Image (cartoon, rainbow, N blue to C red):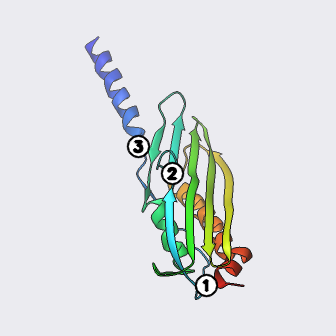
Amino acid sequence: MIKQIITVVLLALTLTACQSTPEPLSLNPVTEATHSGQSIVLNVRDQRAQNHVLRLERHDNPAEFAMAEPSLASLISDRVSQRWTIDEQSSNKMQINIKDGLVIIKQGTLRHDSEHHVRIQVQVTTAEGDLEKTFRGRRESDGPLRADISAIENDFANLLADVLNDLMRDEIINSQLSGQ
């Protein structure tokens, strides 16, 4: 009887050890920014209800969450500064509000599904006036067995890069900032 109890306890501990909490995602979105020569005052605000970028759902277990390292706001600020010079004295202002930035993984026993969402709202204020635009991206993927977190990181970073490239290539925003 004691042998059976010890066996059950060891089996439970082994199964629990296999399900570890996700570590922070290491994101490195590669953007195709060419410096414009324009300067802006940049403010990036994360307006999401929670700051995690990954939600892992397993059957009936409570969801697990992971943050981004560095933060999503820092990543966006860094990539945008590759396109425009950040200058607190500039008359051009850009406010980027992060509305959505999340990967949801639904982990089953034999497969997983993931949804990637990014949505940012950009407000530009110049001498020519105000402009507001929203940029978004969405991807879905699935696969057998357990989700590969490094592949998920890469997919999300690529989606974020695509959204930021759309922002930095936007003709209306670039025209507004150049005064044309």
| Amino acid, disc 2 | Val
Under circle 2, the secondary element is loop
Q: Which residue is mark 1?
A: 34
| Amino acid, disc 1 | Thr
Cα separation between marks 1 and 2: 27 Å
Residue at image x 54%, y 44%?
A: 146
N-term-proximal mark, 3 vs 1: 3
| Amino acid, disc 3 | Thr
Q: Quadrant of the N terminus?
A: top left
What count of labels does the image hold? 3
Q: Which residue is mark 2?
A: 53
Cα separation between marks 2 and 3: 14 Å
Of residues 143 and 136, the one nearer the viewer is 136
* Left or right: 80 as drawn, with respect to 11: right
In the rendered image, the residue lying farthest to the bottom is: 37
N-term-proximal mark, 1 vs 2: 1
Q: Which residue is mark 3?
A: 21
Under circle 1, the secondary element is loop
Which label sits in the foreground, 2 or 3? 2
Crowding at mark 3 (Cα within 10 Å: few <14, some 14-19, many 20+): few
Of residues 137 and 175, the one nearer the viewer is 175
Crowding at mark 2 (Cα within 10 Å: few <14, some 14-19, many 20+): many
In the rendered image, the residue lying farthest to the left is: 2
Residue 140's spot in the image, x, y percent?
A: 68, 50
Under circle 3, the secondary element is loop
N-term-proximal mark, 2 vs 3: 3
Crowding at mark 1 (Cα within 10 Å: few <14, some 14-19, many 20+): few
